[in-house]
Image (cartoon, rainbow, N blue to C red):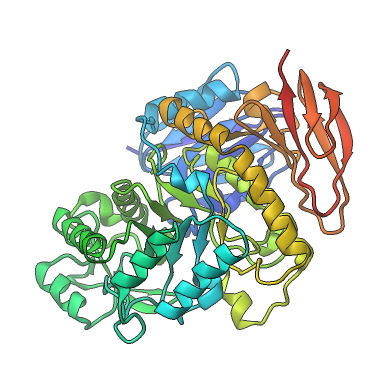
Amino acid sequence: MSETLKLTIEKGEFWYGGFIDDTGRMPYSERSEVHFDAIENHAYNEVNPLLISSTGRYVYAERYFVMDISGGVISLESPGKIDFGKKENFRAAYAYLRDTYFPFDGRHPDEFLFRRPQYCTWMALGENQTREGVLAFAQSVLDAGMPAGELIIDDGWTDYVGQFDFAKSRFDDPKAMCARLRALGFRVAVWMTPYVSPDSPNFRELLKKDFLVKKAGECYLTHWWDGYSACIDFTNPGAREWVRGKIASLMTRYGIEGVKMDGGDPRLYENGLETYGEEGRTANGLAEAYGRFAAEFSLVEIRSTAKCGGLPVMQRIADRYHAWEDEKNGFDGIVKKSLVMSFTGYPYNCPDMIGGGQIGDIEEGVAEDEELNIRYMEAAVLLPSFQFSKVLWSEEGETKRVVLKMLAVRKKYSDYIAECVKHCAATGEPIIRTMLYQYNILPAETGQFLLGEEILVAPVVAKGAREKDVYLPEGKWRYEPTGEEYAGNRKITVPAPLDELPYFVQIKE
């Protein structure tokens, strides 16, 4: 049974959707002109088929929808039932959607991912992943006075896609390498995708077992950034067990502890493919099956899922370019994306690699902007988690000094952040929050957020800015860079030199 729904946007009402790719156009208002097809889904990031309004109105469609916003009217079409209603405010509407459609069960990703930085070898090594390169990357972290954390060995550690073993020509003793990394305090994860190179040994085994996605009875190949590959059918219990066994073997033989689950984007599948489970007949369903498999691991990261809200999985914002503007898929989008993810079911999130992580930046030789790297570091450090890949600590200078300064800020609040994570797992309350969520006040977007209830963070995201406009909610707040105290319920402007992150701590009476 298909349904349609038309909603007139009220004056001063703002809407958000669970489409992380589209946050640049959010919040939707009576002036918005938007088309978004969550059925024929070409998403690069997370999707949850919901809408939620600043006045407490909400929409959820279990079979997704096509949305058009024009002339102050939201028009929705769905092949299934649409749940629409109204609660007393934004926070109550979120609570209803959460408890009804993506409840939290008390589990959360490994606490290590929130207490320590993540280090990914991608921008430093590219596809030239080697034992020597990985060990040198890790040692450079410690030599700079930075803490060990999760170390992700990225694309290029295998001979072919879907191999699930180290390339012997570049990793002559992976067990010793992993033992060395553990001795240095790192926990090791490896990159993987739901794909396998055609005519490789693992491809032939998976084809024989009927564990691959098909189209018109033949093996289906997707075209993605590494070429053409077959797709493992994660709706098939046998295929999941096969992959699970490969990962377990890595853990047993080498001491690998986690996985970075890349790929699996709905944009890289088609609707109408042939899979073991009925849910995989849509691109969204295949992405959902991959995301739910990720929830079997605690030291895990994934970038693109559908309808996987509430799962205890670290969800990464899609790769950003080394640019300031959100319109260029750059830095000035990470805070809003992280916030929208947080109240649409994906609160355990990471704002991509500090400074950007797009392969295009490497291929095109984009020059590094020191100010951008510094402001990116500041904006990321009090988000739920953060990840390094560029070696921003290689030379003495302003960037390295600010990186170390911000790491000290993170360490100062690591216990508080861990408590926020546990609270989120138990209640579904987001780790980071908008003013709208916490205080039911607009404007909803002021380039700031709350970490839990007690810390207000207002990162600088504009090139050249050395001041920051901040709206302080009720109560008293201490501006941590200077120690100055302010009364709330007003807008203020604070100094924001290049080496400072503007943030406040609530003063308890």
Is residue 140 in view from this perspective? yes
Q: Nearer the viewer, residue 310 or 8?
A: 310
Query: Does residue 213 appear left or right of residue 415 in this picture?
Result: left
Q: Position of residue 506 (x, y in %)?
A: 72, 24
Q: Nearer the viewer, residue 444 or 431?
A: 431
Query: Does residue 472 appear left or right of residue 389 in this picture?
Result: right
Q: Position of residue 139 (x, y in %)?
A: 52, 69
Query: Does 97 appear above or below 62?
Result: above
Q: Name the residue rendered at 35%, 38% in the picture.
A: 80
Q: Position of residue 401 (x, y in %)?
A: 74, 59
As drawn, which residue projects farthest toward the top?
509
Query: Does 167 appear above or below 340?
Result: below
Query: Does residue 377 appear left or right of residue 463 in this picture?
Result: left
Q: Position of residue 243 (x, y in %)?
A: 22, 61
| Quadrant of the frame with the N terminus | top left
Query: Does 317 appear above or below 26?
Result: below
Q: Nearer the viewer, residue 215 or 132?
A: 132
Q: Name the residue rendered at 81%, 22% in the picture.
A: 488
Is residue 431 in view from this perspective? no
Query: Does residue 136 appear left or right of residue 491 in this picture?
Result: left
As drawn, which residue projects farthest toward the bottom?
169
Res 8 quadrant in image: top right
